[in-house]
Each structure stands twice: as C-alpha cells, then as structure tokens.
Image (cartoon, rainbow, N blue to C red):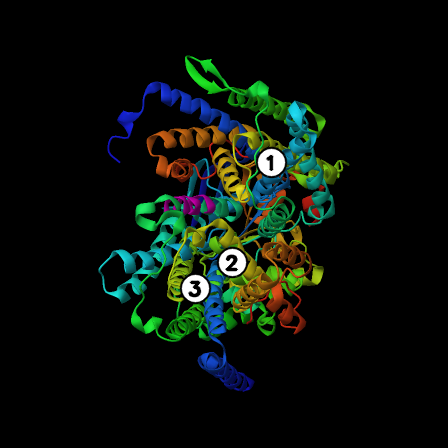
C-alpha cells in the first residue's frame, strides 16, 4: 500500500533523512523505531507532505505522492496525528472532529447551512469509537493532555483514512493513559481494519502491537522486519546503546 | 427541550430590537437618527473585518480599502455614469469583492505579519491613486453632494435603507460564521497547519474569506454614501483600518456582535467627546492602551467570560 | 499623458536623481530604525512616524531657543536624544510588559501611541506650520558635473552613508549588536545563557527611535514641519522595510533607494501621480518577492 524508496531530505546541510526505505501493506500495523534524531518525525513529515523530499519516491497505492501538498495527500487517504498536540484549541471536541469530516465530504465552502445540524451522528460515532463522546461539548483546549492526544487521533479519523500515521501517540501520557491508547490502537486496527504506521519510544507498546518494525538510525533504514528478527539483529542492538535496551523490552 | 425555549427567547429579543430601531426616528431628534445610521454602517464594516480577523485569524491590516472602494464605486457610478441608479448599489459591493479577490490572491501566499504588511502596501497603492487622480476621483477633495435616489433623500429614507441593509448583511454574516465554511475558517484560525493535514486547502478558504469580507465592507461603503452623500480618500487611509481594528478589539473579536458594540462605543464616544475637546484621538489612544493592558478580550468577551461561557479558555465564540 | 518623456532633459534628470538621493538618506535613516525594532523586537512600531515628527518639532524648538548659528547644531544633537529619552520611558514603562503578546496587539498598542503623540504635538506646538532655516554654511548650491545642487542636500548625502556604516558596526562588531542579532533569531536561547535580553531589547528600541528622531531633525530644514507628517512617513518607512526584507539594514538601504529614486523620477515623469510611482514599484516587487528583496532576519 505504501512504499518509500531511497527518500532523502537535508536541512541546511544537515541530512535528516538520508536513505529511508519502508513498506506497509494493507491492514498491517507497522512501527518505526530509532534513537532520538534518527529522522522518524521527518520521515512522517515527508510522507504526509509537511516537508517535501530532496529525492526518492513515496508510492501510495502505486501513485508517487512525493512533494504533493499536505491537503492533497490527505485526500488520497493518508491521515496523521502529531507528536505535539495539534488540535483546534478554541473549538469544542465535537467541532474538532466535525471539521475533519466536513473536509472529507468537501463541504467546507458551504456558507449557508447551519453547521450545528450537520454530521452529528457521524461525528459522535467517531468520538464514541475513541471514547471521547461524553466530552464532546468541552472546549478542546481544556481537556487533559491524554484526552487531547486521543482527540488528535479522532481528528485524523474524520477523513476516513486508509492509512493512519501516528507520531508518538503516547508521548507524555501516564501509564494508564498509555494502556488506553494501546487498546484504542488495537481497536482501530482490529475493528476498523485500519492500516497503521506509527513511531514510538515505548518499546513495550511497539513489540506488543507492531506486526513489522522498521529501524532507523542517522536517517537511514537499518532493517524492516518482524519483531523477532528485529530483536535479534545485531546492528539494531548496537544502535540502541550497545544492546541491553531491547532485550529488556 | 431547553433549546426551544432559548430559541423563543432569542426571537423575542431580535423582534424587540428590530422594533426599537424601526421606531427610533419617531422619538429621536434628526441628529441622533443620523448617528444611529452611522453606528449601524460602521458596525457592519467592523463585523465584516471581524469575519476574517476574529473568525479567520487573518491579519487584515488594511480593511478600509474595501470600504473605500465600495463607497467610491457607488459615488462614481452615481455621478459619472448614466447607468440606472440601483445598479450602482449592486455593483459597488461586487467591485469591492473583486478587489478583495485580487488583493487576497497576492496576500494569502503569506501569513500573519507578512500578510498584513503586504496588504497595507497594496492598500496604500489604491489610496495613493485615489488621492491623486483629481480628474476621476476628485483627489484629496473627494466627491461631495452625490445625487441619491429620491427615496433615500426623503425624511429618514437613508436611515431605513441603512437599517434594512445592515440587518440583512448581519444575518447573512451570522449564517456564514455558523456554516461549515465558518467552522472551517475558525479551525484555520486555531491551527492552519493541522487544517492542511486534514485535507483543507487553507489558502483557498482564506481567499474566499477575503472576498466575502470585501463584499460586506463594500456594502458598508455604499451605506456611507447613502448617509453622507460624499466620499473622500480618508475612507481608505490606513488610520481608518486601524480604527476598525480597535472597534473589533473593543467589542471582543471572538464574538459575533462584539465589533458592532465596539463600533457603537467608538462612534458615540467620538461624537460626544468631540463636543468637549478637540483632542479626541488623545482620549482614544489612552482608551486603547488601557484596553490592551486590562481587557484584551473586549467588552463582550469579558461579559461572556464572566457569564462562564468561556469555559476557562481564552476567546470562545458562542455568541 | 502624451509627451511627458520628451520634455525631460538629461541634466534635469541627473539633478532630480541627486535630489532624490538626498531624500533617500532621510528615508533610509527612518526606515533602518524601524527595521531594527521590527527585526529584533518584532514590534511593528507605528509610533516610529510619531518619533520622526517629534524629532522635527523638537529641532524647531531647540533651534529657536538656542538661536543663532549654533542653534541648528545643538538642535541636530538634542532632538534625536530627546526622542530617544521619550522612547526609553515608553519601552521601560509599558512595552517591556507586552513582548509576548501577538503582533496584532503590539501593532494596535503602538498605534495608540501614534494617536496620543499626534494630539500631544498639537497641544504643545499648535497646528501651524513650523520651519527651521538652513544654517549659513549649507545655504546656496554647489556645482556637481555642472549641475547646481543645494549644499544641504550634499550634507545629507554624506550623513546617510555615515549612519549606514555606524549601524553596520553596531550590529556586526559590537557585543550588543551580536546579542541583538542572536536574540532576533532565538530569544529564549540568548536568555538561557544568562544575558539580560530585556536590557538589550530596550537598547535596540531606543536606538531605533533615536534614528527616527534623527530623520526628523535632518528633514526639518527641508520642508514645513506639520501635523500629519507622521502618517505619511510611517507608511513609506514600512514599505521600504518590507520591500528590503524585514530587519535587514541593507534591505532598508536598498528599499530607501528604490523608494526615493522612483519618487524623484516620478516627479519628472508625471508630477500629479508622483506619489503613486514608489507605491506601484514596491507593490510590483512584492508580487514577485513577497518577503522582500534581501533575506530577512526572521
């Protein structure tokens, strides 16, 4: 479904992504791991168009999408959440998701229909599926950090993505919230059959959910394989501080 | 359903206020009726600015250009063309909208401060042309004694015309703010990057907003001509643009009716302070300073917050 | 508009360009101050025009009070310093509390000063025209390539490069300049290494306003000093800063040259629309390079 080939991007001479290769098949849950500064977030920015690559290809369903604008990529069926909470803080939880749905249904240039009567069921369905339904009338900026991260995912669901990209979905979450996020990801991939690509620091979570794992170091893809093979890979052991880290997980 | 009760209450309020305005000329002296018309059209102008400023988060630094273009378009059509009178009233806002489209096309490539500065430059060019083109626009003198349709020059005709057009415009803008477009626009204000990521073409929406705001500012411009029967280059000078910004700030720019309130306060203050002192701008300046320090959410914003409708988050937009 | 070009002779064009260049000097001095404040403090300071006007009125008052030949020179020094002092009070008293507000608020806040200063000037100096006479040294003209050029304009042509050089040394060679440039890029970082950013900002603000005052002082002998001169200069200065690149001193110079020269040539070509020319040129440039010609600091 998604195929990244020899992707490169440098900022002012700093090679953030040097040679990234990645494959995600339909229905799969794929994790990208790697030490800080390995280029994971830049890779995601490249895939979703926030940053355009210097060279290389990104194929989505056979089409090269490298260099398209973010809104175009989103309309092709790739949606993402962010590492840092990135929501519409002055609007309610309901409105946050509703806007995404409106965008998906191309209603955003409609100036005359009252918005409060539109897409109520659809919006509540999504909120229900992530567990935010009872907070739908709260101003999103006043939610707890964990809820904001979940809302982050809910907004991405509004566009009915085929591929969902999650950039550190549990960053800054408490252990309980992390457990809930894990449950949510399981539901999304299981019940809704979503293809998920995510990066994460919490190795426990990565190894419990990912079907395949891609390891990045210094902007390069070291390996992409099943969790077991990744665990036993020597290069990966070296990349992670001489090895001890991964076996702990 | 408690919702329905609120709706009935709302309708009651709207009808009450409408009736009050309709009957105003019966018990107010002529000057106050004129002043009310001025408040209404200035409020319309401020509301149209707030559409892109408060609800779209765009740094619309030179909104007066669209107001001036609307006023001049009508004035020129009434004085220089043989076209039927009412075509001018329809064409002028459309011309403003077109100017909004052109300026928008150039400016939306940038955001925030750069957007505002570019808009000021473009607006200043329009102003400079109008200011100097004596043979066409009357230059710095402007155009005075514009012949208006008879219905507007009879007693209170201009007032009622202003009242009706302002009411319709406000209604339309209210609909727009609460439409899917309005929602999307607010989302763009809160977080343009995220909007791109959920498939919204941000610039196209900003451009659409600019055209809509230009259109309604143009309507306000035609109303100015209706009330004053004259135009002058100050209608599109940058200081006026900032005064409209102040009105939005004063009333509360995350509220729909705030700018109208701000405009009312400004026009009334100017009129009555002007009686006692010629140093009106000194007082305005001090008021503005105090406002920025102590009341950045504006009068209506404050009231809402105190009423607990702000939910603790700066700048909610329920009203 | 037929036949405008044919009336222009080469000497009159050259002379007009020289006069335009001396006006450029003043535009540059004012715009560079604005650019400095915009680049480092990120304040779009509309009150900059007011400082220019106050500088001109102060020059008039000081020159009149001191009198004689010395009056002019004393005023040239005292007026910009007076302006700088006013700006110091303003910055320490009010502005320094608002640095983290959004640009829109800062813009409106500086506008409130424009309003207040406008009326204060009216209260203090009245609404009559004032003028400062050119000191005897600079009266009359010199012949340059056979063209008569007023001596005072020559004086301006010397001052301009001096100010540019001074600013270059200040921003590139002195410690405060280096800190200011670093703070323009990353304020928190500079604060984190233990430098008092607030004081640096204060200094930059005062220097910027000093330049506005200097511009006002220099322009005083060349034109009537009136109410409203703040409103026209600030727009011109803003356009210059935008077209040159926000916060870039050389950009301000380039912008001032473009503005001053198109203005001068416009007066020859089509006097009625002279003020339109520079605006049109600036807008045309911005269509193609919306962020200005040179790299901005942020």
Task: Name the residue that disc number 2 marks.
Answer: B244
Q: Main secondary structure of the magenta part?
A: helix
Both marks 3 and 1 on one chain: no
Task: Name the residue that disc number 3 marks.
Answer: B181
* B131 left or right of B287 in image: left
Q: From the viewer's perspective, is residue A49 above or below residue B276?
A: above
Please tell me whether residue B254 belongs to the stretch shown in magenta.
no
Query: Considering depth in this image, is C167 or A92 the residue closer to the camera?
Result: C167
Element type where label 2 sits in the image: helix
- Chain ID for label 1? C
Quick check: can you spot residue B151? yes
Magenta segment:
B120-130
Residue B2, position as x, y percentages in the image: 56, 85
Residue depth check, mark 2 versus mark 3: number of the one nearer the observer: 2
Q: From the viewer's perspective, is residue C154 above or below residue B219?
A: above
Element type where label 3 sits in the image: helix
Task: Name the residue that disc number 1 marks.
Answer: C56
Residue depth check, mark 3 versus mark 1: number of the one nearer the observer: 1
* A166 left or right of A36 in image: left
Query: Considering depth in this image, is C266 or A81 the residue closer to the camera?
Result: C266
* Residue C41 in which image quadrant: top right
């Amino acid at each position: 479904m998604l195929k990244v080939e020899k992707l490169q991007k440098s900022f002012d001479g700093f090679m953030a992504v040097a040679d990234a290769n990645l494959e995600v098949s339909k229905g799969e849950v794929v994790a990208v791991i790697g030490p800080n500064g390995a280029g994971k977030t830049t890779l995601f920015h490249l895939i979703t168009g926030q940053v355009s690559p210097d060279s290389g290809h990104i194929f989505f369903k056979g089409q090269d999408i490298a260099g398209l604008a973010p809104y175009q990529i989103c309309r092709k069926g790739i949606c993402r959440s962010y590492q840092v909470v990135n929501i519409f803080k002055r609007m309610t939880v309901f409105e946050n998701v509703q806007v995404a749905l409106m965008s998906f249904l191309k209603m955003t240039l409609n100036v005359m229909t009252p918005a409060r009567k539109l897409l109520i069921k659809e919006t509540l369905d999504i909120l229900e599926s992530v567990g935010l339904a009872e907070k739908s009338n709260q101003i999103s900026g006043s939610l707890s950090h964990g809820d904001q991260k979940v809302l982050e995912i809910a907004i991405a669901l509004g566009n009915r993505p085929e591929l969902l990209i999650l950039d550190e979905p549990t960053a800054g979450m408490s252990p309980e919230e992390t457990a809930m996020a894990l449950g949510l990801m399981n539901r999304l991939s299981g019940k809704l059959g979503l293809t998920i690509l995510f990066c994460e620091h919490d190795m426990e979570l990565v190894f419990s959910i990912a079907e395949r794992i891609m390891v990045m170091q210094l902007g390069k893809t070291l390996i992409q394989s099943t969790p077991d093979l990744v665990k036993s890979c020597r290069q990966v052991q070296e990349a992670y501080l001489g090895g001890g880290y991964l076996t702990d997980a | 359903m408690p919702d329905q009760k609120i709706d009935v209450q709302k309708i009651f309020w709207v009808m009450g206020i409408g009736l009050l305005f309709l009957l105003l000329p019966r018990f107010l002296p002529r000057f106050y009726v004129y002043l009310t018309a001025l408040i209404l059209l200035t409020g319309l102008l401020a509301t149209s600015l707030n559409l892109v400023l408060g609800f779209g988060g765009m740094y619309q630094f030179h909104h007066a250009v669209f107001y001036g273009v609307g006023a001049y378009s009508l004035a020129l059509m009434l004085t220089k063309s043989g076209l039927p009178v009412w075509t001018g009233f329809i064409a002028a806002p459309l011309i403003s909208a077109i100017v909004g489209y052109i300026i928008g096309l150039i400016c939306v490539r940038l955001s925030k401060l750069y957007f505002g500065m570019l808009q000021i430059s473009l607006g200043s060019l329009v102003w400079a042309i109008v200011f100097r083109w004596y043979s066409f626009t009357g230059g710095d003198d402007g155009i005075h004694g514009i012949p208006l349709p008879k219905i507007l020059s009879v007693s209170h005709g201009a007032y009622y015309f202003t009242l009706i057009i302002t009411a319709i415009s406000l209604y339309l803008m209210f609909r727009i703010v609460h439409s899917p477009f309005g929602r999307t626009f607010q989302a763009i204000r809160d977080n343009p990057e995220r909007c791109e990521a959920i498939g919204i073409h941000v610039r196209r929406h900003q451009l659409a907003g600019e055209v809509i705001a230009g259109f309604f500012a143009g309507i306000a411009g035609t109303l100015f001509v209706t009330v004053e029967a004259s135009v002058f280059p100050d209608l599109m000078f940058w200081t006026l643009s900032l005064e409209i910004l102040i009105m939005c700030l004063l009333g509360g720019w995350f509220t729909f009716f705030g700018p109208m309130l701000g405009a009312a306060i400004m026009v009334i203050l100017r009129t009555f302070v002007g009686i006692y002192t010629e140093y009106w701008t000194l007082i305005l300046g001090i008021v503005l300073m105090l406002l920025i320090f102590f009341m950045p959410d504006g009068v209506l914003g404050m009231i809402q917050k105190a009423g607990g409708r702000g939910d603790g988050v700066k700048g909610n937009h329920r009203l | 508009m037929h036949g405008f070009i044919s009336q222009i002779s080469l000497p009159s064009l050259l002379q007009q360009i020289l006069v335009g260049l001396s006006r450029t000097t003043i535009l540059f001095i004012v715009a560079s101050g604005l650019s400095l404040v915009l680049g480092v403090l990120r304040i779009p300071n509309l009150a900059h025009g007011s400082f220019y006007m106050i500088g001109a009125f102060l020059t008039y008052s000081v020159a009149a009070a001191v009198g004689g030949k010395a009056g002019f020179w004393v005023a040239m020094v005292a007026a910009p310093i007076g302006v700088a002092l006013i700006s110091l009070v303003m910055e320490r008293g009010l502005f320094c509390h608002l640095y983290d507000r959004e640009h829109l608020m800062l813009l409106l806040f500086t506008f409130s000063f424009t309003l207040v200063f406008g009326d204060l000037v009216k209260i203090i100096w009245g609404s009559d025209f004032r003028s400062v006479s050119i000191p005897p040294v600079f009266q009359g003209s010199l012949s340059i390539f056979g063209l008569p050029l007023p001596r005072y304009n020559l004086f301006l042509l010397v001052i301009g490069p001096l100010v540019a050089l001074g600013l270059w040394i200040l921003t590139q060679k002195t410690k405060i300049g280096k800190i200011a440039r670093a703070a323009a890029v990353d304020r928190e970082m500079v604060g984190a290494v233990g430098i008092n950013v607030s004081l640096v900002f204060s200094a930059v603000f005062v220097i910027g306003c000093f330049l506005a005052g200097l511009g006002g002082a220099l322009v005083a002998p060349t034109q009537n000093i009136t109410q409203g001169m703040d409103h026209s200069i600030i727009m011109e200065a803003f356009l210059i800063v935008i077209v040159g690149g926000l916060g870039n001193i050389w950009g301000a110079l380039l912008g001032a040259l473009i503005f001053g020269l198109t203005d001068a040539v416009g007066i020859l070509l089509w006097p009625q629309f002279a003020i339109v020319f520079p605006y049109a040129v600036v807008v045309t440039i911005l269509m193609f390079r919306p962020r200005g010609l040179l790299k901005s600091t942020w």
